[in-house]
Image: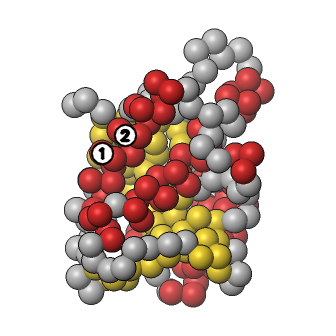
Amino acid sequence: MKIIVGLGNLGEKYQKTRHNAGFIFIDELIKSEKITSFSKPLQFQFNKKFKAEMAEVEREGEKIIFAKPQTFMNLSGESVRKMIDYWQAEIKDLIIVTDEVDLPLGTVRIRLGGSSGGHQGLASVIRALGQAGFVRIRIGISRPVLEQSKIETEKYVLEKFSRRESQVFQESVELTIDYLIEFLGKKMTMPSHTLEVGK
């Protein structure tokens, strides 16, 4: 099985913001024709047990869970841990999708294991699981052009993409979905890889 979790903050205030790249990605993923062609159209439903909006599909005999924790970013690990325990899933079959300010917009880095890199959502997941041996998909959102302080970065990630940025971000999402789809139903771990829009 695979559990694919997009990290973000709940509420209309945070919709379509840079920090909600994980939520945006998962929303687009379940709408992909390459996913819906295997079953009826998918829709998220809130699951109280896991404190998450969830959907699932079976592809070539492999169960695939899609989730968006509804605990706020910094407590995402609480929801993820419940999923891992319930399905007794292997950590390597967990895929966490997040934003990444240290990657240029249009770049996506896929990696098994590693640190949180200062991302509070990833840090929460690592603390809750007691290990970091899961796959993370980090979608680049770039840093603010004139970054002067940590506070400025925190404000920046909670802002919405500009029209130009939104187009590049969407292209990176589509590129990543195409790559990810190849590994669903294969019962194998995604290898480390870097994707770049236009290359």
Q: Quadrant of residue 13?
A: top right
Q: Is residue 151 left or right of residue 37?
A: right
* Residue sitting at the far right: 151
Task: Identify the residue position indicated by label 2 in the image.
Answer: 172
Q: Residues within 10 Å of mark 2 (few under 14, many from 20)?
A: many
Q: Quadrant of the N terminus?
A: bottom left
Q: Amino acid at mark 1?
A: Leu
Residue 21 percent location from the top left of the image: 54, 46
Q: Mark 1 near mark 2, Cβ–Cβ under 8 Å?
A: yes
Give how far apart the Cα atoms at labels 1 and 2 are.
Answer: 5 Å
Task: Identify the residue position indicated by label 1 in the image.
Answer: 175
Q: Quadrant of residue 75?
A: bottom right
Q: Which mark is residue 159?
A: none
Q: Residues within 10 Å of mark 1 (few under 14, many from 20)?
A: some
Residue at position x 44%, y 78% in the image: 56
Q: Amino acid at mark 2?
A: Ser
Q: Nearer the viewer, residue 189 or 37?
A: 37
* Residue sitting at the far top: 146
Q: Quadrant of the C terminus?
A: top left
Q: Is residue 56 left or right of residue 14?
A: left
- Image height of 10 relative to 160, above or below: below
- Image height of 5 relative to 104, above or below: below
Residue at position x 65%, y 80% in the image: 47
Indicate how the structure is coloured in the image.
secondary structure
Residue 84 percent location from the top left of the image: 54, 79
Q: Is residue 22 left or right of residue 118?
A: left
